[in-house]
Image: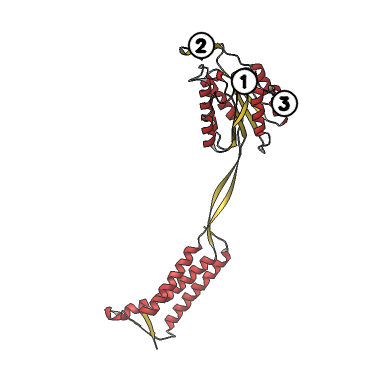
């Protein structure tokens, strides 16, 4: 505790002087008087009790003055508080949803594994704005940039391979993701592009989309998903679903070029564990900047002293009106 106006505490000399003056008058008996208590009939030794009681009003008044002086000196307490400012990153997840993402070299399949791990990645970055773009034969925005994690996660869960026409338009997917983040005021803007195939559709070439991303200073991390060699793939036949071995074809050279041109990095995920490790590595590479400012928070304490003074004055009034009467 400290006082805003400690110099006012010198006024505490006043109640001390009042006490000394009161004692002086009592000793000299300069003002003889008679005091009678209405409680006297019930007291066996009324005179001795009244000699003690008659000093109480003065004590209460002096106490009230002392408390008022403390109150106007403005006692306060302080506590250090921290204000945390976080500068987030704008991230767009661009995900391939072509039917090849149904391959079962991941558990339970590529699309499900990619969604589950992306949801975990979203949950680990509460300070960033994030969005979702999906692409196959064409592309569209599943979720614009937002900090609403519940909405992001729900919309990610709704991603399926039958949302749009089949194919792999990597250029369109990247261009759409860049369009979502290019006008952002964030100092760091990132696209994470995940695909399992070769560009075979779209009006915009991947190289052109990468050049646009580079122009706006947007880093692109590319992820190729798929086992090396062949992967089990469900094929619909007249007898039902048949699991066939299909050759895995990922244009790794193209994905490396996109990442290199934009200052990002290319990763290859061959299973769930590797894909999780890749997202964890990106999570460490793209860190949010946090600033902590400390500032004091003050609490006013004068009310307790003012209340004590008020109670003392009320007790003084009650005693003088109902317990002690001064007779001429």
For the residues marked 2 and 3, what is the alpha-carbon distance in whole angstroms?
38 Å
Q: Quadrant of the C terminus?
A: bottom left
Numbered disc in front, either 1 or 3: 1
Q: Nearer the viewer, residue 187 or 159?
A: 159
Q: Dot 1 corresponds to which residue?
A: 168
Compare marks 2 and 3 and give the one earlier in the sequence.
3
Secondary structure of residue under mark 1? loop
Q: Which mark is residue 218?
A: none
Dot placed on the residue nearer the N-terminal end, 1 or 3: 1
Q: Nearer the viewer, residue 104 or 31?
A: 104
Residue at position x 45%, y 67% in the image: 308
- Labels 2 and 1: the sequence-earlier one: 1
Does residue 218 sit above or below 3 in this rendering? above
Could you say which quadrant of the image residue 290 lies in? top right
On the image, numbered disc 2 is attached to which residue? 244
Read off the residue under disc 3: 211
Given contact means CB atoms under 8 Å apart, are the residues at marks 2 and 1 in contact?
no
State yes or no: discs 1 and 3 in contact (Cβ < 8 Å): no
SS at mark 3? helix
Foreground disc of the pair 2, 3: 2
Mark 1 and mark 3: span between their CA atoms? Answer: 19 Å
């Amino acid at each position: 505790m400290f006082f805003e106006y400690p110099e006012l505490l010198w006024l505490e000399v006043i109640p001390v002087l009042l006490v000394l003056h009161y004692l002086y008058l009592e000793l000299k008996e300069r003002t003889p008087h008679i005091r009678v208590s209405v409680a006297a009939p019930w007291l066996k030794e009324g005179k001795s009790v009244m000699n003690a009681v008659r000093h109480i009003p003065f004590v209460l008044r002096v106490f009230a003055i002392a408390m008022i002086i403390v109150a106007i000196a403005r006692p306060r307490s302080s506590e250090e508080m921290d204000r945390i400012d976080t500068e987030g990153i704008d991230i767009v997840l661009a995900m391939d949803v072509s039917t090849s993402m149904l391959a079962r070299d991941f558990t339970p399949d590529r699309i499900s594994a990619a969604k589950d791990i992306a949801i975990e990645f979203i949950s680990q970055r509460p300070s960033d704005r994030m969005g979702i773009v999906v692409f196959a034969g064409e592309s569209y925005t599943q979720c614009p940039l937002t900090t609403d994690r519940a909405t992001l996660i729900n919309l990610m869960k709704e991603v399926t391979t039958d949302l749009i026409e089949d194919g792999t338009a990597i250029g369109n997917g990247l261009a759409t993701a860049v369009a979502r983040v290019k006008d952002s005021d964030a100092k760091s803007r990132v696209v994470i592009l995940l695909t399992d195939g070769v560009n075979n559709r779209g009006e915009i070439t991947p190289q052109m989309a990468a050049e646009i991303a580079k122009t706006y200073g947007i880093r692109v991390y590319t992820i190729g998903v798929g086992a090396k060699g062949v992967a089990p793939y469900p094929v619909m036949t007249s007898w039902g679903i048949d699991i066939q071995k299909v050759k895995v074809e990922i244009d790794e050279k193209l994905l490396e070029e996109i990442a290199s041109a934009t200052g990002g990095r290319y990763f290859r995920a061959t299973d769930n564990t590797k894909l999780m490790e890749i997202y964890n590595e990106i999570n460490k590479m793209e860190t949010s900047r946090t600033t902590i400012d400390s500032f004091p928070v003050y609490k006013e304490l004068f009310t307790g002293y003012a209340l004590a003074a008020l109670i003392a004055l009320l007790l003084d009034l009650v005693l003088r009106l109902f317990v002690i009467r001064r007779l001429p």
